[in-house]
Image: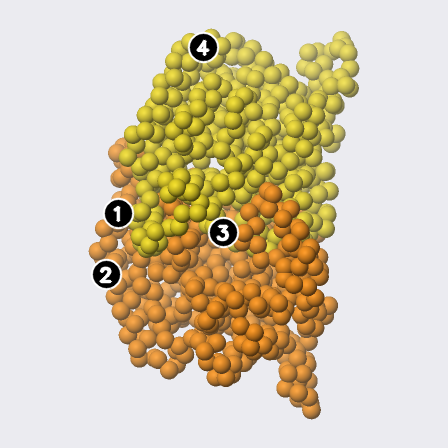
Chain colours: A yellow, B orange
Amino acid sequence: MASALRYSSKLRMATRVPAARALSTTARLRAAEKPFFPNEPTAPSVSTAIPGPKNKAAAAELDEVFDVRSLNMLTDYSQSVGNYIADLDGNKLLDVYAQIASIPVGYNNPNLLEATKSPEMTNALINRPALGNFPSADWSHILKTGILRAAPKGLNQVFTAMAGSDANETAYKAAFMYYRQLQRGGPEVEFTEEELQSTMNNQGPGSPQLSILSFKSAFHGRLFGSLSTTRSKPIHKLDIPAFDWPQATFPQLKYPLEDHVQENALEEQRCLQEVERLIKEFHNPVAAVMVEPIQSEGGDNHASPAFFRGLREITKRNNVLFIVDEVQTGVGATGKFWAHDHWNLETPPDMVTFSKKAQTAGYYFGNPALRPNKPYRQFNTWMGDPARALIFRAIIDEVERLGLVEHTRVTGDYLFAGLERLAQKYPEHFQNLRGKGQGTFIAWDTPKRDEVLAKAKTIGINIGGSGAQAVRLRPMLVFQKHHADILLESLEKLVKLV
Amino acid sequence: MASALRYSSKLRMATRVPAARALSTTARLRAAEKPFFPNEPTAPSVSTAIPGPKNKAAAAELDEVFDVRSLNMLTDYSQSVGNYIADLDGNKLLDVYAQIASIPVGYNNPNLLEATKSPEMTNALINRPALGNFPSADWSHILKTGILRAAPKGLNQVFTAMAGSDANETAYKAAFMYYRQLQRGGPEVEFTEEELQSTMNNQGPGSPQLSILSFKSAFHGRLFGSLSTTRSKPIHKLDIPAFDWPQATFPQLKYPLEDHVQENALEEQRCLQEVERLIKEFHNPVAAVMVEPIQSEGGDNHASPAFFRGLREITKRNNVLFIVDEVQTGVGATGKFWAHDHWNLETPPDMVTFSKKAQTAGYYFGNPALRPNKPYRQFNTWMGDPARALIFRAIIDEVERLGLVEHTRVTGDYLFAGLERLAQKYPEHFQNLRGKGQGTFIAWDTPKRDEVLAKAKTIGINIGGSGAQAVRLRPMLVFQKHHADILLESLEKLVKLV
């Protein structure tokens, strides 16, 4: 089933591409693909200041009860369609941020709409189960036709969760339990009286001082365990107690990658050595290494498949688990369903976490020993939300039906080529362009980044940043070449505006 | 609005109570109330072993991909109605566990069903927003007519979350930020360079060694921060690293409370002194005290309003925040909308967390200084789920329409009186009966507790435990006197079966 999903993807729209005609380049490219959303606007439209008067008034009202200082815009979802997001003042922006990389198949996708009308969905919404105790009779079916249909190769089990942070933290918990089980000598070895008593006091040996190794600039969430592995920005971490866990340097590569092969390989070697040294020497023993395929919040930092294969080898060699955080990279945006599919690993990661475009969350695993040795060790009341699991299933259907993974690979290549042209023309504004061959998961550095992001809205583009100076593209999987053309034109305009 | 909800509640059904007739006591009581669900079974029906053959087969299939060792029963929600839960083999059990205390208004409630059909719900499901960045235009309206309509007195703000654990952890984060802000001298004081740098290394002063004080036997969740305040059972905590945070003794009262007033008051005094001593002396300074109104997972442990007023005074006096975890006690089950409404506090708690029966989660607060001093300090991609917020709104409507808080108070008194009769007759089987005047939030201790719970299913009662030896009742708010009669009769049968 999973392999069907991975390999049946083909660009169905490609069969409808007409021969090139005597049109302007832009018009020709726009004509080259049939829109996935026939009712989408053909271009952004902005008719007020942003935020406009209605947005301002509504924001003031919301501010009475809810913190709005991170507000981008109050959104009129009823008027948003496909790749276009509408605000309260009637402005319609091409959205290449997509709810922080979490909308996969377009606003008001008609097939998702259809999925909301099923009796299964109604049941999931009004009879919310405690999935560990009282799963619905069809939970196995929902998993097998949904979340697990998209499971990474080699991982056929899932623990379901609510969002990225708890997906990551439950994976960490599984790692700690597994590590201690190895130390004890197996699943059948009972806890000692000392362990049982000390853990009630938050002390070792029952609550051991073990650690998760993550990387500088990583982002893995904002709850206490996940935040202890997050190293993106001080504002995410300040004033919150953290575990004394190690961080290794994530490779700081030079772009374009193909021009710096040798020195980048050396940099990655250096980082791998640091990882292995920390695993061997850090004072709080390392139970798992946690890594993003592309550091997404931390500035769109890439590393090569060889680096990740190296991590897999080091973790194997040291009996440490290897967890891949695909919360932001997963579900097609890099031109593979899972970004780690780019690595050609010999053995799969021990766990892969997901959220965002999946619209639900959790971690995949394959090794049955990652089920804790007793029930109720990995448990909570809801353990996810079947309503959101049903939405993910509908998303997978849509991805498969339209061949959106392959589509995103092809569109990403097209978009990247356009950005390379811009970078040649305006090198100062498009520095360190990165994400080649990674679908639409593309970024670059630019001076006055925050001003760029704000100005982009005024010309109809909703776009986000990552790290301190990167513009990050996170369009949906239904982003097409004619959207890429509009985006490229707008980015060129922005060069002159900022 | 909130007061309307609290005070308009009246037992509408009471107007329909017929005069007592020449019927058996049970029949008379059953006739006394019109059922909220006319299509409910009139009694449990069990026709197979539990688990029956279909359940066993389906569990084996689910086990291929999902841990089923905590499975109670595979549920046929399409056949579940009101207070009755149906399993795959056609058995229908009176459900006084209710998805671990999280179903408020009955299975397949027709008004919740109606709420799933609104355009707002469809939008929330298919266009899931990043609520901190791109809330829907009606988010303010959804909050004000829903989550905030039910806000505890004095708390008019909300931070929305996904489930109990992250609701509690985000409240802790708010507490730590607030505490450090007081230490710094106000919201306008900038972070030092040392703080900015040290926090990236998970070290103080940027990542300070502050603590949350919780109580022995408390349960506040299972992620890393919440688990560090959970002290229920070793199996919840073993092998997971924990923060070095303090625990105070929760009063160990003698029941019935009215027979042990003096010694219980002394016990509570002793515990309050311990709390104050820990706040003053614990090596990791205490930013907040976290407490459940009734320790729910930890064994249904009660304390008096005076104890909680004492906690409020101590926390005020020591400039420490007072957080009340109403994840399990909230939304009506104790005969008040919020259990802390029983306490007559002079000033409200600083934060109140909610989940379970709310079907969504978060924390309420009132003090504007609990909004962190800068944006993006308390933030995540989804910040809750508007689909679930809409369900909570429909639940609040239903609670109000049917007067379910007052109804639960009255039904609870009726049930408690019946249990007192059983306790007199079978004192060994109904020890430490507790929860008088607390709606249906009732428990008692019994020998062979786990056997009692298992046997209960065979006679048609789905019931849960808490702590090591308590049977806990967590019926829905639509539990009525005729259900109480069935429950009481069944509990008497169980005495003879175990």
Earlier residue among tags 2 and 1: 1
Earlier residue among tags 4 and 3: 4
Give me the chain letter of mark 1.
B
- Neighbor class of circle 2 (other Cα within 10 Å; few <14, some 14-19, many 20+) is few
Residue beneath disc 2: B277
**Number of marks in picture:** 4
Q: Residue furthest bottom?
A: B22
- Separation of residues labelled 2 and 3 (CA atoms): 37 Å
| Residue at image location 50% in from the left, 35% down from the top | A351
Give me the chain letter of mark 2.
B
Examine the rendered structure and indicate whether residue B214 appears above or below residue A401: below
Is there one chain holding both mark 2 and mark 1? yes
Is there one chain holding both mark 4 and mark 2? no
Residue B171 in picture, x, y percent from top left = 41, 51
Residue beneath disc 1: B183
Dot label at residue B474:
none
In-front residue for pair A1/A467? A1
Is there one chain holding both mark 1 and mark 4? no
Query: What's the residue type where badge 1 is placed?
Result: Gln
Q: Which quadrant of the figure has residue A58?
A: top right
In-front residue for pair B195/A269? A269
Tell me if residue A210 can be seen.
yes
- Separation of residues labelled 3 and 1 (CA atoms): 43 Å
Residue beneath disc 3: A375
- Neighbor class of circle 4 (other Cα within 10 Å; few <14, some 14-19, many 20+) is some
Q: Which quadrant of the figure has residue B205?
A: top left
Query: What's the residue type where badge 4 is placed?
Result: Val
Which type of secondary structure does the marked residue at label 3 adopt?
A: loop
